[in-house]
Image (cartoon, rainbow, N blue to C red):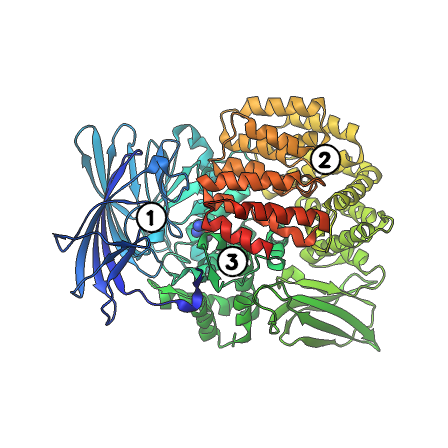
Amino acid sequence: APVRREDYRAPDWLIPQVELDFALDPARTIVRARLHVVRNGEHDRPLRLDGEALETLSASLDGQPIEVRIEAEQLVVPIAAASAVLETEVAILPDQNSQLMGLYASGGILCTQCESEGFRRITWFADRPDVLSTYRVRLSADRARFPILLANGNPVERGEGEGGTHWALWEDPFPKPSYLFAIVAGDLACNADTFTTASGRKVDLGIWVREPDLPKTAHAMQALKDSMAWDERAYGREYDLDRFNIVAVSDFNFGAMENKGLNIFNTRYVLADAETATDADIDAVAAVVAHEYFHNWSGNRVTCRDWFQLSLKEGLTVFRDQSFSEAMGSEAVQRIDQVRMLRAAQFPEDAGPLAHPVRPDSYLEIANFYTATVYNKGAEVIRMMRTLLGPERYRKGTDLYFERHDGQAVTCEDFVRAMEDASGIDLGQFRFWYSQAGTPRVEARLVQENGRAALHLRQSVPATSGQPLKQPMVIPLKVALIGADSGREIAKERLVVMREATHVEPFADVTEPALLSINRHFSAPIVVTAERKPGEIEALAETDTDPFARYEAGQELMTRDLMAAIFGQPLRTDAVVTAVGATLRSQALDPAFKADAIALPAESLLIEHLDAADPGKVHDVREAMRRAIGTELADDLSRAHMAASRADPASLAGADKGLRRLRSATLALLAAGNAELGRSLASRQYDAAKTMTERQSALMVLATLGGGEAEKALDDFYRRFENDPLVIDKWFAVQASVPGDATLDTVERLMAHPAFTLANPNRLRAVAGSFAGTPSAFHRPDGRGYDWLAEVIVAADKLNPQTAARFVAPLGRWRRIEPVRAAMMRAALERILREPGLSKDVLELAGKSLG
Ligand code: ARG
Ligand code: ZN
């Protein structure tokens, strides 16, 4: 039965203090827990603690052994007094833990993952975020195999034990929920540094990795120090412990985890150098390091009351890490990347069977709600509040929020109320952004006459499952009018706040023909359809004064002509070719922006516009457009490709990264125009590459073109990086992302490769995630792509339900696909559902995906 938000009840018992003792052994670890429990309010209900996969060895209450009574995965302990000390002893099996939740082994390192409900796989506990405790943790283990013993908080004491063991005692003075608990034991080396906070506290920083990986931790360390300084400047938030540790492990279900004072990361978001990581990977390292660090305030000091409030910490923290990245790099390019990601991952979610509000109302398995809606739409919701309040009042709001709720477990409502109280601005209607699912649509029409203009807006929010009727939302739209002749802002940018279903915005003194620039900076996470005059988008793509809006106009232009051809008209390429040519030749635009602006909308995005897409047709039309650009602009592209080779391979400055981005984008278009030219340019770029950015983009082009050069480069790549799992993931991912029907055979061969394993989430994502994310490969007309994915989901589910469940969504997109394939997609989902012993994770998503 699903858990429902409205059923929330405060905990019957609190656990202010916890003492844990771990006798660590990968085969069988013994965990002794001493819980100081206190009755919360007047009631006579027993203490109920969660546990999963625990072998209970003993239990006692106030020193007296008690009978172990277990009901529905809960230990039930009747207690007469108002407080008591409960002691339990359990055995757990880290080596057998393939779910990677709780205590598990990764490449000889013992580590934990507790969010959301992993702590119950370590010991009996009230495993919910509104039970906050201080922890004292003793770890003991074999000294040779596990020389380093880490836990949350501060180290207190250490010593030698019997039989070659040693031990360490850690204490975390900050009360925290169990999901922030962490320990690590292993043979780890440390990149050590320090940071002095604004108030003069010296913090010891450590990034712990396997010894050979130490040289690859410099970027992460720099990002950590930048993040600490930025959070002081932008939000007035200082770090609060004497020590901050990051540990990198190779087996991890997602990106990273913000455990108090002991963040645990997927190696993918720590290890990076120019030779083995692309510029995009390196930027992602900085963003994730920042994200997890920022959680120390938005998540740890102020945490969530229950898991329905997940966006309270995730939406806010994503917004904070986005703002950090904007401050560190080019703001416009960052914004374009954020919106791309939102459109690729969140819009389809909001338009499909898995649509849910930013604050969900119910779930079967909370792990399924770590979604683009909770994270990325959640971040857009915070961004809109900042836009509506203005930066100063927004900052007053966050100051009040942190001050008022420090040490508490609170709700999204508490955050909005702090914003209201600090700013005096009513956010009543704005709250629909938390409760209503679906991407709002706005239709816009600019009417101009007699020296005036009026912008007519109409909004609607599509029905989503369980929410047939919607209320009008508050939609903050940044709008400007651009003179069609002068190219200047003839009406300066203003904020139009839509509150009703329709809105008319007047503009005085508009004498020149006006072009409508709307939703500038992507001020609202919505779909805008503007009625366009002939030539208007073309003109905006060249003149819009907001770089983001200029990019948008280019995308709108490309989408218009691609969609017309998908609907059967002859493909018009002239307008797009002209716009791309102008972009390439522009002296004013920077290379990173150019790289984004010349890329066509992704196939998955085009499919989202359709009701019965033929993915093969979408691919062919898009390829035809790319071919036209590649042939007709060969000179401009070659010049840009050549010029971009001047990027300094040793530099990560924005200018050099931008040049490399443009080099990859132009190479891909040249190859689309002329396969022979593409092969020779890509081979040369591959051989001369000094950075992974150049090498990987060349390899992708070669793999797509196929033939002897592709095989040669793939073999070289494998041999060169054989001992670097993160780079071998790229080798798998590149081959699984080649467009076309033949990729399924490649993918089946990859699964049989000795380096493939279903047990490692990064490796599985590299193959299954890449394949399912390549529409022309996944949607083979014979449906075998769907069958393959369904089999992978079923097999992976037996090992790791959380990771298996992540691959269900692509099958749930059947509503957008033509009926023959859609039926086969549904059949694949039904086959998954017939599998006995399915996890809650996969059951929930596959069931909902059928609708
Ligand atoms: N809190 C982590 C973050 O920084 C992610 C945890 C994901 N947990 C899960 N069960 N999927 O975003
Ligand atoms: Zn997070």
Q: Mark 1 points at which residue?
A: 52
Residue 428 lies, with reference to residue 197, above or below; the image says below
Q: In this view, does 355 lie to the left or right of 48?
A: right
- Which one is earlier in the sequence, the residue at label 1 or at label 2? 1
Corner quadrant of residue 139: top left
**Horizontal relation, residue 811 to residue 820: left or right:** left
Q: Which disc number belongs to residue 558?
A: none
Q: What is the C-alpha distance between the residues marked 1 and 2?
A: 52 Å
Q: Name the residue under label 2.
A: 667
Q: Where is residue 471 in the image (x, y as percent from the top left)?
A: 60, 74
Q: Residues within 10 Å of mark 1 (few under 14, many from 20)?
A: some
Residue found 72% across the figure and 77% down from its top? 504
The amino acid type found where label 3 is placed reads: Val
Nearer-the-camera pick, 468 or 576: 468
For mark 3, give the secondary structure.
helix
**CA separation in Å, label 1 and label 3:** 27 Å
**Looking at the figure, which quarter contains the N terminus?**
bottom left
Side (left or right) of 490 relative to 324: right
Mark 3 = which residue?
A: 374
| Residue 787 seen | yes
Give the amino acid type for the residue marked by disc 1 in the picture. Answer: Glu
Marks 1 and 3: which is nearer the front?
1
